[in-house]
Image: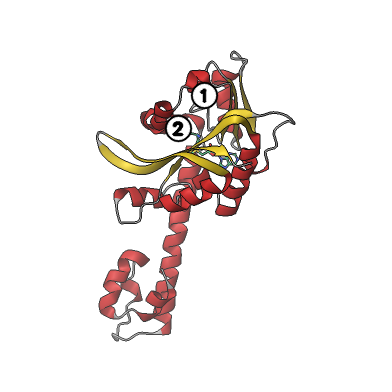
Amino acid sequence: MPDSVAGQCTRHELTSCKKEAGNVEDVVDLNGGRSADNAKRLENSATDEQMLRGHVVSTLDAIMRQPLVYRMWMAPFAKKKFAPIAAHNDLGLIRRVLDVGCGPGTNADYFGCNDYLGVDLNEQYIRDAEKRYGASQGRRRFLTADVGKFVAPPGERFDFVLVNSFLHHVDDLTTRTILLNLSNLLTEDGHVHILDLVLPGSTSVARFLAQTDRGEFPRPLEKWHQIFSESFEPEVFEPYDLGACGVGLWKMVYFKGKSRI
Ligand SMILES: C[S@@+](CC[C@H](N)C(=O)[O-])C[C@H]1O[C@@H](n2cnc3c(N)ncnc32)[C@H](O)[C@@H]1O
């Protein structure tokens, strides 16, 4: 909660502040006045709430890091999320795929006939993906690495670079660095394909879900367009809804672009 609110609440206002600050009953001055003590205690309540939120998010994060949990959570949405890529591209023509932030191989099934390399920071995801796809399918490889520092072997290039639901996990500077690096890894005829979470401007379920996502950096559409276009010439920029049973839950965007280099 902003300091200005914590420091200026009247008794009446405190009732509404309660929603933001948590349990505020014990902060009200019995004399009906304001006091520095009250403000301080209200502020502490807000900090407590932020800490609680932090705990909830990190607990959820720890749970979602488990490959099986993540795969079960993603299962109803993975195909719909990937739909714009399937609609705009002939996957049969792809030669070499780099899947950036590949998770536990969520998208690997689309690239059974292609040379495929999936990279992710979470070793558990990579082990899970290897178990399911690795050993028996020589053309699919998985690597544990920080994409921000990933350097492909010299001369290794990809005509299909997939970045699915990854960039809203990294800040602007890192996002720009990664995209520039990826633009260097594309073949001349290759494309980057990005699917990511949009932060809608107006109050809505989609905005709430974007704000409470594990990834801290969902961005407005215009911001995504700007960031993508710095490293790639746009060919497709297509917003779409992702949801279940006809109800839109998340706002997403698909971007396809060629390297500017
Ligand atoms: C929302 S998941 C998306 C996974 C997968 N692309 C999918 O479509 O299901 C984001 C992924 O990014 C990975 N990740 C986050 N930061 C990373 C980094 N710096 N380098 C590589 N992977 C990272 C996480 O481990 C996680 O698997």
Q: How far across and down, in percent of the image, does residue 163 sit?
A: 52, 36
- Given residues 159 and 112, the one toward you in this image is 159
Q: Which residue is mark 2?
A: 69
Q: How far across and down, in percent of the image, does residue 192 sit?
A: 54, 35
Q: Is mark 1 within 8 Å of ligand 1?
A: no
Whichever of labels 2 and 1 marks the residue nearer the N terminus, that label is 2
Crowd rating for badge 2 (residues with CA inside 10 Å; few <14, some 14–19, many 20+): few
Asked whether the beta carbons under mark 2 and mark 1 sit within 8 Å of each other, the answer is no
Q: Check disc 2 and report its element: helix, strand or loop.
A: helix
Q: 61 left or right of 136?
A: left
Type of amino acid at the residue the image marks with label 1: Ala
Type of amino acid at the residue the image marks with label 2: Val
For the question of whether residue 141 can be seen, the reply is yes
- Given residues 175 and 122, the one toward you in this image is 175
Image quadrant holding the N terminus, namely: bottom left
Where on the image, by quarter, is ligand 1? top right
Residue occupying the point 43% across, 30% down: 85
Tell me the CA gap for discs 2 and 1. Answer: 18 Å
Residue that sits furthest to the right in the current view: 154
Please name the colour scheme applied to the rendered image: secondary structure
Q: Which residue is mark 1?
A: 108
Residue occupying the point 65% across, 38% down: 184
Q: 31 left or right of 175?
A: left
Image quadrant holding the C terminus, namely: top right
Quadrant in the rendering for residue 27 = bottom left
Q: How far across and down, in percent of the image, does residue 114 sit?
A: 56, 19
- Given residues 85 and 59, the one toward you in this image is 85
